[in-house]
Amino acid sequence: MTRLSGITPSGPGHVGNYLGAIRRWAREGSPDDLYFVSDLHAMTSPYHPQKLRGRTRELMAILVAAGIEPGTLFVQSDLLAQLGPLTWVLECGCAFGEAARMTQFKEKSTDRTHEGTPVRVGLFTYPVLMAADILLQGVDEVPVGDDQAQHVELARVLARRFNGTYGEAFVVPRAVTPPAGARIRDLADPSRKMDKSARDSAGVLFVLDEPDLLRRKVKRAVTDSLGRLEYRPEEQPGLANLLDILAACQGKPPREVVAGFTSYGEVKDAVAEAVVEELRPVRERTRELLADPAELDRIRAVGGERATERGAHRLKTVLRLAGVA
Ligand code: AQP
């Protein structure tokens, strides 16, 4: 049973990515799983090439530092020579209307953060690239949240269609829902989820933020003037978000961690210390890895070669069946 999970270097990794995904991958992943930094996906909206390269490296280092098995980890662009042709084959098997139905495209293409910048064709076609990511590796399962389930469904449709039209080449993957974890929200605006690409980083706790900066950001977190120490996400989203973070760090339900506090200030102090301690070993190990580029390159090459080997035979079969090789 192989599973594939990715993370996009659209900004520096934050505590939401860590608690919601990376830590779980490291704790629960099996040696058959595959994890990748999806740098090609980050090109679908305006970006800076040097920053993208740096963030890709940084996220790789964070994943290794968090404990993900190095051989199971690769960078998407290291497979570009395979993903390029496969994406083309899949695009030629995808109806325009199918791609146009993707709700994430509709949302992202009208997102106000990109106002004034043209919407990229890559943003429209990226679900097909995602299908190529999945189908190239022949994975059985793709753990995804609601926002990505439609993309995995597209991968299933494209795989079945190719198999039915040209011959068996693809494993038809299943979307699986990862165990529910709280969606961590922006500390400065709890109506939004914590985002790597947020315009203002005041409410985003980055994995590589120094402890003092983490503490300052938590101290300034927006709460409310009700003064009620309860877990009520609808009525008190700021406080509930802090409790979600604390609960995730302590491995307890949020309603349980709220007991015993007598002020919001106490909650914030506890959250700040919990986050600082949770992230400390990851931050320190990431810094060590970033200071040792040869080791990071070695880890990247091992994972890249393994993934390339996995995909080589399948791509050959696909191109042959499609009549182009
Ligand atoms: N705020 C969050 N709380 C919990 N989990 C989160 N994840 C992301 N944000 C939160 C989980 O992190 C994994 C990798 O995410 P992604 O790279 O696919 O991007 P995303 O979901 O679009 O996350 P970001 O960080 O908010 O990036 P941008 O700014 O590009 O939109 C996923 O498992 C995701 O669920």
Image (tube, rainbow, N blue to C red):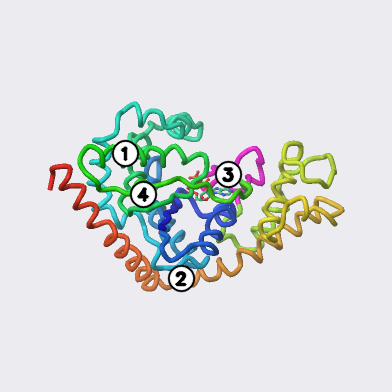
Q: Which of marks 1 and 4 is nearer the N terminus?
A: 4
Name the mark on residue 293. Answer: none
Q: Which of 91 and 310 is in front in this view?
A: 310
Q: Would you say 276 lies left or right of 30 here?
A: right
Name the mark on residue 200. Answer: 3
Residue segment shown in magenta:
185-204
Q: Which of marks 3 and 4 is nearer the N terminus?
A: 4
Q: Is mark 2 on a helix, strand or loop?
A: helix
CA gap, disc 2 and disc 3: 28 Å
Magenta-drawn stretch contains 294 = no
Q: Would you say 113 lies left or right of 302 here?
A: right
Q: Which of 131 and 265 is in front in this view?
A: 131
Q: Is mark 4 on a helix, strand or loop?
A: helix
Q: Which of marks 2 and 3 is in front?
A: 2
Question: Would you say the residues marked 2 and 3 are in contact, meaning their CB atoms lie under 8 Å apart?
Answer: no
- Amino acid type, residue under disc 2 in the picture: Leu
Residue at the spot of label 4: 134
Residue sitting at x 19%, y 53%: 316
Q: Which of marks 3 and 1 is nearer the N terminus?
A: 1
Q: Which of 320 and 166 is in front in this view?
A: 166
Residue at the spot of label 1: 158
Instruction: Give percent across and percent down for residue 324.
Output: 13, 44
Instruction: Give percent across and percent down for residue 210.
Output: 61, 63
Residue sitting at x 82%, y 40%: 225
- Amino acid type, residue under disc 1 in the picture: Leu
On the image, which quarter does residue 152 sit in?
top left
Residue at the spot of label 2: 289
Q: What element carries label 1?
A: helix
